[in-house]
Image (tube, rainbow, N blue to C red):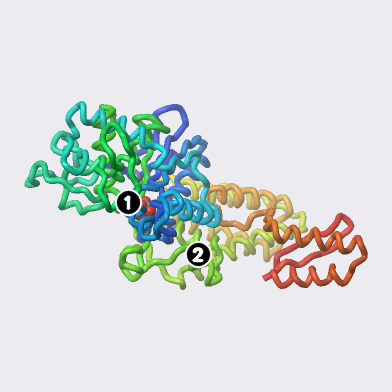
Amino acid sequence: MSLKLYNTLTRKKEIVKPIKDKIVKLYTCGPTVWDYAHIGNFRAYVCVDILKRYLKYKGFKVKHVMNITDVDDKTIKGANKEGISLKEYTRRYEMAFFEDIGTLNIDRADIFPRATEHIKEMIAIIKRLLSNKTAYKSEDGIYFDISKFKDYGKLSHTKLEGLEAGKRVKQDSYEKEQAQDFALWKSYDKEDGNVVWKTEIGNGRPGWHIECSAMSMKYLGNHFDIHAGGVDLIFPHHENEIAQSEASSKKKFVNYWFHNEHLLVDGHKMSKSLGNFYTLRDLLNKGYNPKAIRYLLLSANYRVQLNFTEEAVKAADNSIQRLNDFMIKLKEIKNNTNKKQIENIIHKTKKQFEDAMDDDLNISIALAHVFEFVKEINTLMMESNVGKNNAKKIIEFMNEIDKVLGILEEKEEKLSLDLMKLIEEREKARKEKNYSKADKIRQQLKEKGIVLEDTKEGVRWKRVK
Ligand code: AMP
Ligand code: ZN
């Protein structure tokens, strides 16, 4: 079957057909690096991760660009408050973001362009918009004239009737009811401190929306396949991206618009402004397993809201433990009575998994089939009806679907550099017959949950809980 995705633009599920060959060009609105991202933000990145991994599973190649918004109203305010440069301020949160996506096993994009390094490209678009009169200069910057773009509102279904022509909005975020001419370029204001670009279109800085148009079109072309982000970005951000991009290139900007629903807390969107958020670090400090957090964020369909509770993280942890225990049991099978029946069960489950995922990434159904499969095989294992070769095939199948899910424990876990050094130091002490030092280090490692085993092939380690 072919993969169908819900397209916000057409309000329909559509078969994904890339513009060129089997290469899907995908753009995700990345983080605004003004603070640590919260796990609501990570729901957005996990949803795109599942999309991307499933596209690859279906045999597509994916070129993925995720921008880093390192200049906007919030980053400037943050840097000025601390009295440090914008770069110093934003790099701190950019680094934390990269660390966090690694922790959540989110596949890295091919390119992470920074807004501050693409000012030239933004100016080129603004100049084209000025010359074709879809943009105009005003006393505090350069604005896009929404009345000149006849399709304005097509993504968010915003009606322009009744709005006063020429009303302008300078800040980056605003409500649908306020659809107004928006800032492409903001003239220098003393609140910007030392954040200023001296350019041919004036001294100032870019608006938020133009950043994504410039970076997506630079790396993916004027017309590309999928643009992703949370539903809160549909208006004004994505509506404005379409307007600027299409008015400047005279081409259709994007074929499929992919929007994830929010992570909620007690019925409200998790957000910094409501103060109802958890960062990933908060949850790790409470001792939660990052894979359980990933599982929770991916386990609901991307188009439904998901309520966050700590109980839900605990339940997610139980679910992945069940899968990991299942894998361990399979690896321990010694029996040689292989049954054809097992291959049929794998085949059936693979089809159920794919059918569900093909239907707009219906992951809750896909996961239900995986857990039914685990239950069925577990029963057969208890009856000694799963042989060694059967187990090998089951493991292969589980690893294949885990390329999409990314939740199973890695086959070869790597230790941190510090722990590796300790193991080496103990080896050295042992060779030098300094057994008291060797034992001390062994104890030190044990306290960190690492147990050593001396074998003929050398020292082995394993993690204990
Ligand atoms: P920001 O850094 O605020 O631009 O947000 C980064 C991404 O997270 C965007 O795609 C937002 O739509 C998304 N996002 C923000 N809050 C939530 C939430 N509570 N649940 C899901 N996605 C969110
Ligand atoms: Zn964006």
Element type at marker 1?
loop
Identify the residue under disc 1.
193
> Can you give x and y, in whole percent of width and height, for residue 311 in the image?
46, 73
Badge 1 crowding class, 10 Å Cα cut-off, few under 14, some 14 to 19, many 20 or more, is some
Instruction: Write the residue at 40% across / 60% down.
Output: 82
Q: Nearer the viewer, residue 85 or 364?
A: 85
The Cα–Cα distance between marks 1 and 2, rounded to whole angstroms, is: 31 Å
Q: Quadrant of ligand 2?
A: top left
Instruction: Write the residue at 46% across / 55% down.
Output: 93
Identify the residue under disc 2.
281
Left/right placement of residue 7 relative to residue 289 reads left
> Can you give x and y, in whole percent of width and height, for residue 376 in the image?
58, 61
Q: Nearer the viewer, residue 446 or 60?
A: 446
* Quadrant where the N terminus is found in the figure: top left
Regarding residue 303, the answer to whether it shows in the image is no
Badge 2 crowding class, 10 Å Cα cut-off, few under 14, some 14 to 19, many 20 or more, is some
> Can you give x and y, in whole percent of width and height, for residue 98 in the image?
51, 51
Regarding residue 384, the answer to whether it shows in the image is yes
Q: Nearer the viewer, residue 273 or 13?
A: 273
Instruction: Write the residue at 75% across / 71% down.
Output: 444
Circle 1: residue type:
Gly
- Of the numbered discs 1 and 2, the one sitting upstream in the chain is 1
